[in-house]
Image (tube, rainbow, N blue to C red):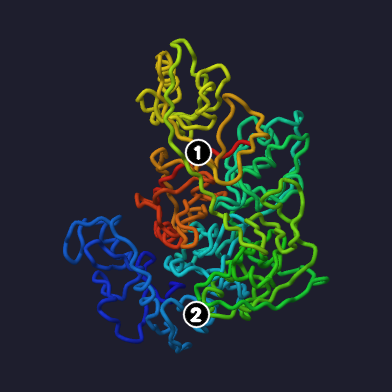
Amino acid sequence: LCSECGQFHLLLDNHLYNFQDEVDDELICHICLQPLLQPMDTPCGHTYCFKCLENFMQEYNFCPMDRKKLSFQQCHKSSLLVRNLLDKLIVFCPFKDECQQTMQRCELEAHLQNRCPGFKKYKSELQQKKNPVSKGKEDPPAKVETNTPKDPEVPSGGSSLVAESSAAAVVSLGTAEPGLVNPAFEETEEGENLPQRTSLVAETTTIEIHREDPEEELGMRIVGGKDTPLGNIVVQEVLRDSVIAADGRIAPGDHILEVNGVNISSVTHCQAVSFLRHPGPVLHLMVLQEKGFSNKSAQQDSTSAANREVIHVTLIKRDRSEPLGIKLIRKTDEAGIFILDLLEGGLAAKNGKLSRNDRVLSINGQDLRQGTPEAAAQIIQTTESRVNFVILRQPGMQLSDPVEDSSTSNNSSSSSSSSSSNGGSPVHHRRRVDQNHYRRKSHYQKKTVAIKKEPKESLGITIGGGRDNKNKLPIYVTSVQPIGCLFRDGRIKRGDVLLSINGIDLTHLNYYEAVAALKSNAASHSVVLKALEILSLNSPEPSSDIKEQGFGWSPLWITWLGLPSYLHCCQDIVLSKGNLESWGFSIVGGFEESKGNQPFFIKTIVPGTPAFRDRKLKCGDEIVAVNGVPAIGMSNSELIPMLKEQRNKVTLTVVSWPGSLV
């Protein structure tokens, strides 16, 4: 029995509904002859169900109606107006013996999971068949709620709650907030032997790193920062034979929350690099580490309520799709759901009554003491207006305040509400809206440098990059030596990307080819260099903290984000998975009306999943296309369904930039 529509159908087939009224022919799919589900428009003006069209296009290359040539990649989702009209069609509850209610089609799944006595009875009987020993015992409420696959159409309306089981891994299917999108963590129900739906487990750990040489680099690459869609600081790579590698406790994908007691969960990329490059014999790091999915059922809550305060909070949404701006987490050492973060500018943050580390006891009367973030999301997604929280608060559970943008010292903010929790998601000051948040833009300018020189005079530069590099970087200047003609001229600087020399294109050359081209042309009386200079509008590069010089120097990760697309070198990564697996990665970014187009980035890769086992995808990678369909201009609510609809195989076209070395 499908838990979304409450009827029996093949896993790969469309959901089935009992409609109250006859549906207009304009809203009917002419393949299955049923009201449209996840409608897709063709260039020739016809509309079909996503699954119907996808199955048809696997065998044919033309439109079913007019037989014009067609490929699936040319089709796109129908307008929001059409999708809303379809979602509002009135349907009967399929359990008509126990429930005679009618509702909008988009509300049926939530009705089944939370309110339908017939579906509850069915699940109870099914559970007793699977576990005869437990006959007569009432199932805990979380078991029905957490076994809830989400319909891929949900994100198009936006989620009311961001349900997150760790700082990086967002479990809800869609949201209007940046940095909170996860197409990866959906479980698919198939057959009676499906295990109970799992949640991600994450732990915060304090790690002490010792260095014999206080100025020795740690040996890891980082991505992210407040001025990027990633939000918090994420470890992209640990270098072999480095201090971090020798310690062995930090791994790619870990989120760095604190450095020597300073909360860096709300600092820019450059500030984080400065903190991590600061010399010293001992370094204290607090990190959030994903531990993968957990199948453990919730245990009885043995936590004492002593010294805790029960608080009632009501949030009022303007409409059902308005996000609350809350991120939730499960802890490994305590049952239930906890508030990890309140997004600046969100409904909850503006209300001001919820705090980080509050434990959610119930929402709208639904008991969540043994619940999960997924169950909480489902309840709130179906709420039209008033969302009533009952939370348990224990004082003294917050971390130190994040540093101010303009500060690099360990000064706490004057606003106590800006403290972070044991999570590591972006934390922002509630007292003002930072207009540059997620808006950091790097611009570039082209420059042509023509120099007259002596034939034997050196250019006096060293270079890095090359298309044979692991990240397939363009050629860039690593140093300008004080002995050559370019130092005397002064226009070529460290970090400039070299485009050509005397008309010879350098953008597609490997390192050794570029060195040969520069040397051969340096023998001329005149040299014309074309270069690209990346202009950062925000924090300057922390050059005072850089100990590496010459060949060892490389640009910060955030610098590469400002390159024009023609210098990007894309690669295709093909992931495969089983029917019951998730892809195992989360994404952030996408188009928003208030912020415009932002790239999609990989934020989390979960241990033990297909993305983790493949080893090619890295945190900080930019998603350019999915199965050949460009992602540029898409919102997260458009890209998520596209990823979720790929059953066993997906091709991600990504650009991978090296993280900043610390």
Residue underneath mark 1: 534
Between the C-alphas of marks 2 and 1, the distance is 53 Å
Q: Quadrant of the N terminus?
A: bottom left
Mark yes or no: residue 249 visible: yes
Q: Which class describes the residues within 10 Å of circle 1: few (<14), some (14-19), or many (20+)?
A: many
Please report the residue visible at 63 percent of the width from the left and 61 percent of the height from the top: 296
Query: Relative to residue 660, is residue 453 depicted above or below?
Result: above
Three-letter amino acid code of the residue under disc 1: Ile
Q: Where is residue 65 in the image (x, y as percent from the top left)?
A: 19, 67
Residue underneath mark 2: 111
Q: What element carries label 2?
A: helix
Q: Where is residue 173 in the image (x, y as percent from the top left)?
A: 50, 64
Tell me the quarter of the picture where residue 211 sits.
top right
* Nearer-the-camera pick, 70 or 497: 497
Mark yes or no: residue 137 visible: no
Are discs 2 and 1 less than 8 Å apart at CB?
Answer: no
Q: Which class describes the residues within 10 Å of circle 2: few (<14), some (14-19), or many (20+)?
A: many
Mark 2 or mark 1: which is in front?
A: 1
Relative horizontal placement of residue 263, taking residue 228 as reference (left or right): right
* Nearer-the-camera pick, 529 or 428: 529
Upstream in sequence: badge 2 or badge 1: 2
Query: Relative to residue 222, is residue 95 depicted above or below?
Result: below
Three-letter amino acid code of the residue under disc 2: His
Please report the residue visible at 54 percent of the width from the left and 27 percent of the height from the top: 478
Q: Is mark 1 on a helix, strand or loop?
A: strand
Tell me the quarter of the picture where residue 17 sits.
bottom left
* Nearer-the-camera pick, 489 or 244: 489
Q: Where is residue 533 in the image (x, y as percent from the top left)?
A: 48, 36
